[in-house]
Amino acid sequence: MRVLLVGAGGVGTAITRIAARRAFFEAMVVADYDPARAEAAVAALGGTEGRFTAERVDAGDEAAVAALLRRHGCDVLLNATDPRFVMPLFRAARSAGAGYVDMAMSLSRPHAERPYAECGVKLGDEQFAEAGSWAEAGALALVGMGVEPGLSDVFARHAADELFDEIEEIGVRDGANLTVDGYDFAPSFNIWTTIEECLNPPVVYEKDRGWFTTEPFSEPEVFDFPEGIGPVECVNVEHEEVLLVPRWVEARRVTFKYGLGEEFISTLKTLRLLGLDRTGPVTVPSAGGPVVVSPRDVVAACLPDPATLGERMRGKTCAGTWVRGTKDGAPREVYLYHVVDNEWSMAEYGCQAVVWQTAVNPVVALELLATGAWSGSGVLGPEAFPARPFLDLLTAYGSPWGLREQ
């Protein structure tokens, strides 16, 4: 397998460090708009016997990405950029005859008249609209294959296959007790993506109703996270699992709730109030004349790069899937989860916990595709594949998952 990795930020760099320890691929081309980032990611790997190569590419330039895929003879494109670049990279892979894997899906657009009641364009709609052409070509686009979405979806598949006869509700629940020394506000993940998913109308799925939306930060609940993290208040947030899980797993209700905390929610609300969450260009005066910028990009530029926060971070992050239903005629409720301790991920890989936890899952998926343990064609989510091979291999990577009876 020959892989083109687009994006050498925090998650992309973590991917290279995880992949460097595995033998399932022949070569990985690490490409970024900033060639210095790609070169730094490759240089940090030391002696990798020439398996890693750095390149420069604009993720928004479909033709350039397709040409890079062809020039290096890559079998698959792994997208580690932010969601703005999903569609150009998705199309570039198809035009070059390569497979495709991402960790976040094509962007949503709220309903014009009833944004907090009805869905407009849903996450992933643009990708699923092209599923036919991928299937006809016998090509695979594996979408939403990070940690959330990704591992959380694998947990949902595992619950349906092995733990339940009928499922009443699947609820992804994400929480952490991470702190960052020296910062009052320092998101541990890409702020552009965080704003997108937290301020958009959250989506809920109910079997009798389909997909619908609610107000941001709605339905607060306190969820008790394992391994010492403890109780965290979680709220509804827009996320891909709600759009993916019902396509392959039978459940009466699907939700996603994120443990953000009151201060984080207040900050996001202030950004929206001031219009700083906007992605459209505004003109700003400067010493060199007017400059056109996106307010959201300005916010991102003012905050520390999450990839650089690892040595200042303390605590653990938990991603997991809570499932309620019946087994052998009796009620059952479980929480399947994956916890990463920042102290461990920094010592073992030099990567902070949140980006490492995101990065390990697409590498595991690529290995399953390379060995044939997973195979398929079309545009498919993680739920479309058997869960057990993934969970077993994740454990073999030295990062076991857990199951708690509720």
Image (cartoon, helix red, strand yellow):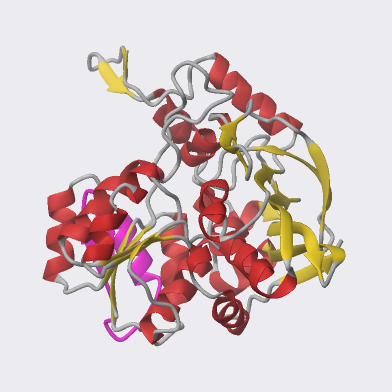
Provide residue 125's location: percent of width, then percent of height: 39, 43
| Residue 9 in sight here | yes
The quarter of the picture where the N terminus appears is: bottom left
The quarter of the picture where the C terminus appears is: bottom right
Q: Residue at x 40, y 75 (%)?
A: 45
On screen, residue 135 versus residue 370, left or right, reads left
Which stretch appears magenta?
30-58
Question: Is the residue 61 above or below the residue 44 in the image?
Answer: above
Residue 56 is covered by the magenta coloring: yes
- From the viewer's side, name the closer residue of 49 and 175: 175
- From the viewer's side, name the closer residue of 110 and 161: 161
Q: Residue at x 66, y 45 (%)?
A: 255
Provide residue 318's location: percent of width, then percent of height: 70, 58
Q: Residue at x 40, y 87 (%)?
A: 23
Residue 106 is covered by the magenta coloring: no
Provide residue 159's location: percent of width, then percent of height: 68, 68
Give residue 326's quadrant in the image.
Answer: bottom right
Question: Is the residue 293 above or below the residue 350 in the image?
Answer: above
Give residue 170's quadrant in the image.
Answer: bottom right
Q: Residue at x 16, y 63 (%)?
A: 96
| Residue 352 in sight here | no
Provide residue 366's location: percent of width, then percent of height: 41, 74
On screen, residue 127 versus residue 110, left or right, reads left
On screen, residue 245 versus residue 9, left or right, reads right
